[in-house]
């Protein structure tokens, strides 16, 4: 008689098939002896094959008619070791590597968690940086318009206006999209973190609500993103004013929104009353400057939250740095993952420490402290 077996492992209280181990059909002798064996499997790795070992811990027998099915619950036995180490450059093309103490599984788990949290911090930092770069692109393009126009053939002024409005719309769409992505990302992140026991959403929601309730510019740009997504392009006019100025010509350029065109094709909700109080033409730059101030307030609150979340991770990784620097001041720390291969040799993979992320944490921490101090002084 043949017996069908399946290898399973426990994950979050549920038994799941071991992906690397195929189901097998074994005879009666193997079924009786398998409980005393270890199940081996190999996977490709670098120059050799990594050996994974599974130990059978439980067996479940199921009978359906003439069919007998055995489920074997297995536990993976580690064939790897983690060691703290460092590299030091001793010649232009010569790096010396040193392996130091072992890192326990629990310590490795904590370090992985710390690097993951610092990675989350960097994701939020990058989103804010993308918003700021898109904003700076608008400001740079706007500031360069007079100089660009002066170099343009006046007979092609209409073409210059058309292309400039098109480009400004492109830049503004990028900025509005990146800002909404920033908000949505943090809303989702802080909601999940609250479910894990943190308390982030309250402060973040308070910051965004204050901006929305007290600033027309924030409400306007918040709704404008929906307008450009569903209705049309926001920038509707560009005005060029040339005035004689001490033997030359001074060029002033204004570019912005047409209030009535915005109102005609979109439901602005509470912002409609705000718009009706504005002039028929809303110049971009003053509106953008008012919005920028509110975005800075939100970003400061988000930065404080992120720094608080990542602080313990930053501390753990800095402790590793300090430990290595005490032994080798110029050494660059890493964690070596030593893996036993099937041929009996050992292969090492290096897990590098996130130097850049730790530096950015330090930088953002100092920047946040400076901004908080400036706000307190201004108040």
Image: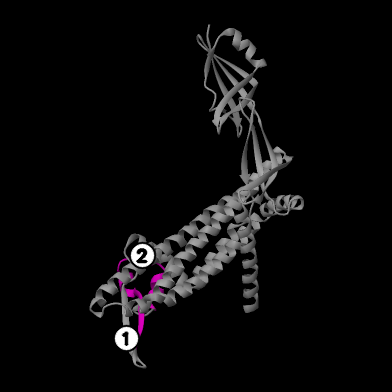
Q: Is residue 366 visible?
A: yes
> Would you say residue 134 sits in the magenta stretch?
no
Per the image, label 2 sits on a secondary structure element best described as helix
**Hey, which quadrant is residue 299 in on the image?**
bottom right
- Nearer-the-camera pick, 70 or 83: 83
Per the image, label 1 sits on a secondary structure element best described as strand
Residue appearing at x 31%, y 81% in the figure: 240
Q: Where 43 falls versus 179 (above or below)?
A: above
Residue 270 spot, x, y in % from top left = 42, 69
Highlighted range, magenta: 249-277
Tag in front: 2 or 1 = 1
The residue indicated by pointer 2 is 170
Q: Which disc, if any, is residue 32?
A: none
Q: Is residue 379 visible?
A: no
Residue appearing at x 63%, y 47% in the figure: 94
Residue 51 spot, x, y in % from top left = 61, 27
In the picture, measured across the screen, residue 265 lies left or right of residue 292, that is left
The residue indicated by pointer 1 is 242
């Amino acid at each position: 008689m043949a017996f069908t077996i399946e290898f399973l492992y426990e994950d979050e209280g549920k038994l799941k098939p071991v992906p690397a181990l195929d189901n097998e059909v074994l005879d009666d002798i193997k079924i009786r002896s398998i409980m005393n064996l270890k199940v081996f499997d190999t996977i490709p790795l670098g120059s050799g094959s990594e050996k994974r070992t599974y130990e059978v811990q439980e067996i479940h027998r199921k009978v359906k008619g003439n069919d007998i099915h055995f489920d074997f619950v297995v536990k993976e036995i580690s064939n790897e070791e983690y060691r703290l180490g460092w590299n030091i450059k001793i010649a232009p093309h010569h790096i010396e590597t040193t392996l130091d103490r072992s890192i326990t599984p629990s310590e490795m788990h904590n370090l992985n968690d710390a690097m993951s949290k610092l990675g989350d911090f960097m994701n939020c930092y990058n989103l804010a940086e993308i918003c700021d770069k898109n904003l700076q692109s608008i400001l740079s393009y706007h500031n360069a318009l007079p100089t660009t126009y002066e170099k343009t053939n006046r007979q092609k002024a209409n073409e210059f206006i058309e292309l400039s409005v098109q480009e400004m719309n492109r830049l503004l769409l990028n900025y509005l999209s990146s800002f909404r992505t920033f908000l949505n990302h943090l809303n989702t992140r802080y909601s999940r973190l609250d479910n894990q026991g943190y308390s982030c959403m309250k402060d973040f929601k308070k910051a965004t609500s204050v901006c929305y309730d007290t600033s027309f510019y924030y409400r306007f740009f918040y709704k404008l993103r929906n307008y450009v997504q569903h209705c049309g392009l926001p920038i509707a006019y560009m005005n060029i004013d040339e005035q004689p100025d001490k033997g030359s010509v001074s060029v002033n350029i204004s570019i912005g929104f047409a209030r009535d065109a915005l109102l005609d094709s979109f439901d602005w909700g509470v912002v409609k009353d705000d718009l009706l109080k504005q002039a028929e033409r809303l110049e971009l730059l003053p509106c953008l400057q008012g919005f920028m101030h509110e975005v800075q307030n939100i970003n400061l609150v988000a930065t404080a939250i992120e720094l608080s979340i990542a602080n313990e991770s930053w501390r753990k990784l800095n402790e590793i740095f300090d430990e290595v620097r005490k032994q080798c001041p110029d050494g660059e720390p890493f964690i070596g993952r030593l893996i036993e291969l099937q041929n009996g040799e050992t292969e090492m993979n290096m897990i590098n420490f996130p130097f850049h992320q730790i530096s950015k944490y330090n930088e953002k921490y100092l920047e946040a402290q400076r901004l908080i101090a400036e706000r307190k002084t201004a108040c």
